[in-house]
Amino acid sequence: MAAALTVSWSALAAWPHWLIVLILLPLGGAVLTPALYALQRRLVPWWALLVAGLTALTVLPLLWRLAHEGPFSYLPGGWARPYGVELRFDEFAALLAAAVALLAPPVLLFSRRYAARAVPAGRLPFYYTLLLLNLGGLLGLAITADLFNLFVFLEVVSLSAYALVAVGGRPVAELAAFKYLLMGAISSLLILLAVGILFALTGSLNMADVAQRLPALATPAALTLAAAALLVGFMLKAALFPLHNWLPEAHASAPGAVSAVLSGLVVKAGIIGLVRTYQLFAGVELLDTANLGAILVWLGAASVVMGSFFAVFQHDLKLMLAYSTITNIGYIVMGWALASPQAMLGASLHLFNHALIKTTLFLAAGALIYRTGLRTLEELRGIGRTMPLNCAALALGALAIVGVPPTAGFVGKWFIALGALQAGRPFFALVVVFGALLAAVYYVRIINAFYFREPEQKAVVTAREVPWSMLAPVLLLALLCLGIGLLARLPVEFLEPAVARLLDGRS
Amino acid sequence: MLPEMLLELRPNLDYAAVVVLFCIGLYAVIVKNNLIKKLLGLNIMETAVFAFIVTSGMVEGGAPPVLGPGVMPPLASPLPHALILTGIVVALATTALALALIIRIYLQHGTIEADQLRELD
Amino acid sequence: MKKPLVIALLILLALALLAAMAELPAVGQADAPVHTHVSARYIEQGEAETGAHNLVTAVLLNYRGMDTFGEVLVLFTALCAGFAVLLAAARNGNKHYRQPPAPQESGAVPVIAVSPVVSFVVRLLAPFIALFAAYVILKGHLSPGGGFQGGMILGALFIALTLVLGKQYSARLLPVAWRPWLYALAPAAFLVVGMIGLQLTGYFLGYPQEPAWHGVREAMMVTLEIAIGVGGAVLVASLFLALESD
């Protein structure tokens, strides 16, 4: 029986078109959403949930094949590389795809009741459309192996993200969305400029082909500019210090489910971009990658420290979470740039785990705002008594963001700290510990406000738990925050060869 | 150092124009106070990058990459043109959304000057 | 105070950019990698492999069809983003919504009086503009032109007609019940053509190359061109209507 199951699984996974189905499902689903709204508006949230669920299922055969065969490609149009656009499913694409698959269904389930209140009725179909476009764009960006195609999918992600920030119609959010758009557009242009330079130098757009041709070039300034433009562009997208200014307002003022997607997944697009940049330039000897790495390590460390400091002093719960995103992006970038196997492993793990934790936190915070309309810790005092389950989920998520073992946040940070020691740079292990200590401070602030203070606001006293369709995804994600830390062995074994390959300069 | 660089740049003077355009656009984005002027600056930057990529596909004395009777090689490279057609659509989309946001900001706050908006916060 | 600093920084940036640009292959040099690597194949075999005389079309719809699929998705995203930002926020008890400041003069919306000359000229030219748009869309297959360019002409025509004839007319030109389907048209056409390609060649967005199938290949590409054109026109028209609605 087990053998038969294995055989049918591998037969299923061998179907060559899963990779294209992975992006066609959410994008096609998004395209039909406005029309479905015109026909039967009540079905739209369920439709979006169905599409997200199917997309999540599609990831399974892909992961299976990746685990058994290693990275594989799909060639739309059948043109061999570098003549067409290549899609490629490698371990880093798998990380982001798995995060999207795991988080999209809970976010959309949560959205059904939440968005009905947070988003004006006329905009609702476009809220779901944009969410699906955003998720589909993220998947496309993760799996594309072509520089220009990466830019195009990045734009699908960015445009939908700008609009999603403003979809709730709060004046603050519209200003934040414009600021986000301006920064995002500049970063996209830098990336496009770099793509243009690389194209002029190599005549190719396929990442593997470009990476192969770059080492033969004798143009240090042009290569440096291309690398710098890509780095700055993706750092802006990922909101790494000192390019983080746009993030807190945008993520804090967006509707809760949107904040979850933006903070959990969309900033990771920048990280994936940084990984791709590294893969492009790893073999180039003209370029001083060690120096670039050193800059990135310090910027990552600065992000950790500054993000934590700002987070500690916030009164607004969502602003606190938004600053904590900057901290965690700092961990991930620092881990990558330390370029020791364990640090890179930790960064990859944390990319996934942070997505999970931050989604939990923002959804739980969104649920609090849904019931009370209050946003600051002072106003929310004592909410732990009236919404115990939701607050327990939030507390669990906060524990995970501090990095207490055995929660999800622990594993990644642990490996990053180990990696810093492995690289012979214990200072950065200290940064990890320091960041965790500061995170503990705001964790205590949250717990203190929720559980150890008397409720003052009427809205807090009369609050009830949110409906089950909102509470269930929050609780499920919170349990995963707790449980996934215990299952860390599996992804570690999965990612180790990928990291080793990356360090060898083979993509 | 500078004169040498300029000498080296001579065959690539077209690109120098692109650099100037890019910096003018960035200047407008950073310095201008009016949100629409910032957006115009962004559009200038976009134009610069598009011009750069299209220029890289040019061939001295080349024909457009449209085949037909009497069209002789060398032909300009079709790839940059195709890329920039997509790029233009992206720029259009970004501009449209930005203008929509500006309209909303004006409706909500009654101004689109960046410094006045900061004071309102 | 801020300006000189910005200018100084921008000059530094410009120098860095110039230094990099100086190292690129000379503009127009025929043996630059841009011309010898991937493009060479497009130029030499593009017509035989794709059936398009316009090699830009060949790259756009065939070799790099995924990019163009992404392009129509960006258009669709922009459309939805515009709606998500612009559509009335007043309903649904949104307590954050503030009434827009009332216009200074009396009369809610300033009515632009259209002179009879303008109105006449626009109406006179409309069929010719529409014909030209169709020409640009279809001719793009063979010579300069293409779906997006033609679509923009069509969209501009729609705006001109709405301004001249009023919104009642635009509802007749672009029926409300059709609109959500028209938004979806361009990406959906890519999905359908891509799937047909999958059936015929085994690759998404693949085109059959055997001589017997050339008609089908032609039809697939023309379908995409028309869909891109209509999609672009609908984007421009709908965003214009959404802007007007508030």
Image: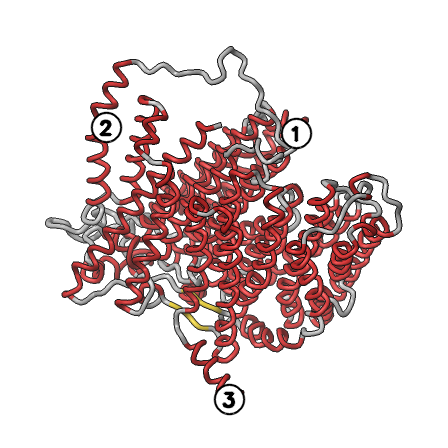
Going 50% across and 36% down the picture, which residue do you hit? B98
Secondary structure at numbered mark 1: helix
For badge 3, the amino acid type reads Ala
Q: Which marked residue is nearer to the observer: mark 3 or mark 1? A: 3
Image coordinates of residue B21 in percent, x first then y, are: 43, 36
Q: Nearer the viewer, residue A167 or A87?
A: A167
Going 21% across and 60% down the picture, which residue do you hit? C44
For label 3, the crowd category at 10 Å Cα-Cα, with few meaning under 14, some 14 to 19 and many 20 or more, is few
For label 1, the crowd category at 10 Å Cα-Cα, with few meaning under 14, some 14 to 19 and many 20 or more, is few
Residue at which label 1 appears: B118
Question: Real-space Cα distance between discs 3 and 2?
Answer: 69 Å
Image coordinates of residue A502 in percent, x first then y, are: 54, 70
Residue A392, above or below C91: below
Residue at which label 3 appears: A3
Q: Is residue B94 visible?
A: yes
Q: Which marked residue is nearer to the observer: mark 3 or mark 2? A: 3
For badge 1, the amino acid type reads Arg
- A434 left or right of C174 in image: right
